Amino acid sequence: MTVGFEVMARDGAARAGRLATAHGTIDTPAFMPVGTAATVKAMTPEAVAATGARVVLANTYHLMLRPGAERIAALGGLHRFMNWPYAILTDSGGFQVMSLASLRKITEEGAAFRSHLDGSRHLLSPERSVEIQHLLGADITMALDECTAFPSERRAVEASMELTLRWAERSRAAFVARPGHGIFGIVQGGVHADLRERAARRLVEIGFDGYAIGGLAIGEGQQTMFAMVENDVPSLPADRPRYLMGVGKPGDLVGAVKRGVDLFDCVLPTRSGRTGQAFTRTGALNLRNARHADDPGPLDAQCRCPACAGFSRAYLHHLVKAGEILGSMLLTQHNLTYYADLMSELRAAIAAGRLGAFAALPGEAE
Ligand SMILES: [Zn+2]
């Protein structure tokens, strides 16, 4: 039953592990590309798999509104619908309700809102969120949470965190256990160490298959984010995966892995790819910049991706400037390959006990 998790090696607080799901095994630490609307934008599933990714994240909020969870279930589930044979983690929909929906109202029952697409009314309760994720066929389901805005008054953060804990209990109760499928609880509590610790301890009492560190990377800054990760990790079980939601930049990933995080997701590599930004082993590049116009060299000489193997910076600059779709495709594939290789290098460093000296970029602070 549930998802299996085995820690294979440790280096300080960091671990290298294997997360076993109904749709394959994920070597951790791992980065999950974001496939919001049942597609990683500008990428075929084959291209996503070629980067090395073995799990993607899909968004409950978007899919419940369009094309609809019941429709996807009738068509054989999300794996078949999007032709992705590996693992899928779905978010609970809570974050998007807060950030995208209009006229939202949070009550004990759930989040009532109007669709940003057509104004239709919906209620996302913990039970409905878990049901939608079951209809989609998610390998990893997330409990419904309320992501508190930053900054907020401590009293508001505490009330929101307590609501998230009650929703976590209802989410856990609504989850139908199946082999290779699991449900993760989410630690909230803003930037208040004691609230977060209380949330983590309560989630562990309820008992989840994995634990997410939520409510961070929303404006508090890297130093505070790392401090909250250091605060939360000791309260979470050593034998269960830990997922830092919505993070982040390469240096954020390295710093969080060093502090014991196993899973990440972020729109940064895919969104940046569509706006002409590339992450490389020598730093980030803006392909719009005219200095690339005559450069025959690759984006990153050490990268194995198709964009680096076959094309020059000059050509990629041309594609980006001309607004060609291929520019988005190649830069997304490069960025996701860079992220996958960064995680692979982190796993190797943990296994070899040399993580201490590891940096995303030479001299970068962590
Ligand atoms: Zn590349």
Image (spheres, grey):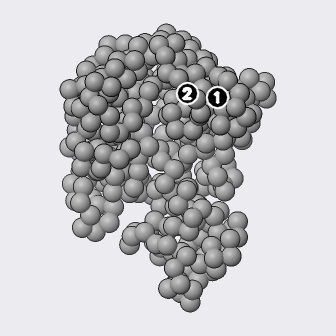
Q: Would residue 181 be visible to someone looking at this image? A: no
Mark 1 CB near ligand 1 (8 Å cut): no
Vertical order, 202 against 330 (above or below): above
Residue at (41% x, 46% y) in the render = 247
Of all residues, the one furthest to the front in this rendering is: 103
**x and y percentages locating residue 283 in the rendered image:** 39, 70
Q: Residue 194 sits in which quadrant? A: top left
Q: Are marks 2 and 1 in contact (CB under 8 Å)?
A: yes
Helix or strand or loop: what does disc 2 sit on?
Answer: strand
Mark 2 lies on residue: 104
Residue at (32% x, 39% y) in the render = 151
Three-letter residue code for mark 2: Arg
Vertical order, 8 against 278 (above or below): above
Q: Would residue 331 be visible to someone looking at this image? A: yes
Location of the C terminus by quadrant is bottom left
Three-letter residue code for mark 1: Arg
Q: Nearer the viewer, residue 216 or 75?
A: 216
Q: Rounded to the nearest whole Å, what is the CA distance between mark 2 and mark 1?
A: 7 Å
**x and y percentages locating residue 307 in the rendered image:** 59, 70
Specify few, some or many for label 2: CA neighbours under 10 Å numbering under 14, 14-19, or 20 or more.
Answer: some
Q: Looking at the image, how many numbered discs can be counted on the residues?
A: 2
Mark 1 lies on residue: 114
Is 147 positioned to the left or the right of 356 in the image?
right
**x and y percentages locating residue 36 in the rendered image:** 61, 42
Q: Residue 125 sits in which quadrant? A: top right
